[in-house]
Amino acid sequence: MLSRSGAFETDRLQIKEWHSGSWPTRSENDLARIVARILTEPVTRTLPAAWHGAYSEERASDWIAERDREGATLLVAEKASAIPVGLVILLESPSEDGTELRLGYLLAEASWGKGFATELVDGLVRWCRAQPKIRSLAGGVAPDNPASKRVLEKNGFCSSGLAGEEDGSEEILRLILRTPT
């Protein structure tokens, strides 16, 4: 499993495990408030239906607990202000020839259009290239989210087909970091 060493920085962003003690949050309630501010209707619109709707602190706390059970979640903050602007969700699929990380990222609506998504994914790719056990990254993109697809493509991801829990409409983009030896 990813450890807190999964922290990395870009020119404008600081990204690290959301439960680490060095964030300005003081409690789980602070984290729930941050998550509730990020997970607005426009942000969750292209995500699974269970993620849609308004987020109270209680619902955000439940969402945090679910993410903690699934994998690693990183909080993204602007370096200059330390204001949280997004989340990165990483799920591991280990195999004999290395680990594939399934990537999900969410940026607060106020952070859209600033190049943060491209910068964030670039930083993650650079961090993953330095980890010898990570073989590839994959991200799913809903058909009605072309901006996210462009972000992944700008960072070297290529389409590897369709997938999806219900209708197979999610496009999977993959970046091979190293080939099996």
Image (cartoon, helix red, strand yellow):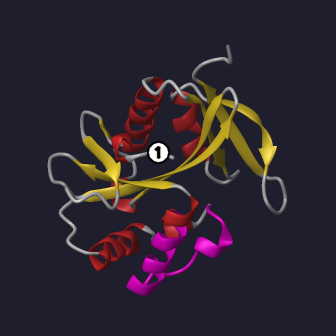
Would you place residue 60 above or below residue 149 in this image?
below
Crowding near the residue tagged with mark 1, few <14, some 14–19, many ≥20 C-alpha atoms within 10 Å:
some
Residue extending furthest toward the right: 167
Is residue 49 at least partly visible in the picture? yes
Residue 66 image point, x, y percent: 54, 70
Residue drawn at x 71%, y 41% as measured from the top left: 172
Residue identifier under label 1: 2
Q: Position of residue 15 (x, y in %)?
A: 32, 46
Q: Give residue 83's position: percent from left, percent from top.
A: 22, 58
- Residue 42 at x, y percent in the picture: 50, 66
Compared with 39, 21 (above or below) is above
The overriding secondary structure of the stretch rendered in magenta is helix
Give the residue at the far top of this rendering: 181
Task: Tell me: 119 left or right of 41.
Answer: left
Q: Is residue 63 left or right of residue 113?
A: right
Instruction: Count the numbered circles shown.
Output: 1
Displayed quadrant of residue 9: top left
Seen at 68% across and 18% down, the residue is 180
Q: Please indicate whether residue 148 sits to the left or right of residue 86 in the image.
A: right
Which quadrant is home to the C terminus?
A: top right
Left or right position of 149 against 171? left
Q: Which of these two is toward me, 136 or 1?
A: 1
Q: Residue at x 49, y 64 (%)?
A: 68
Residue at 45% of width from left, 69% of height from top?
Answer: 39
**Which structural element holds mark 1?**
loop
Magenta region, residue range: 47-67
Residue 115 seen? no
Asked whether residue 57 is drawn in magenta, I would say yes
The residue at the far left in this view is: 80
Q: Is residue 144 found inside the magenta-colored segment of the image? A: no
Which quarter of the figure has residue 152?
top right
The kind of residue on which mark 1 rests is Leu
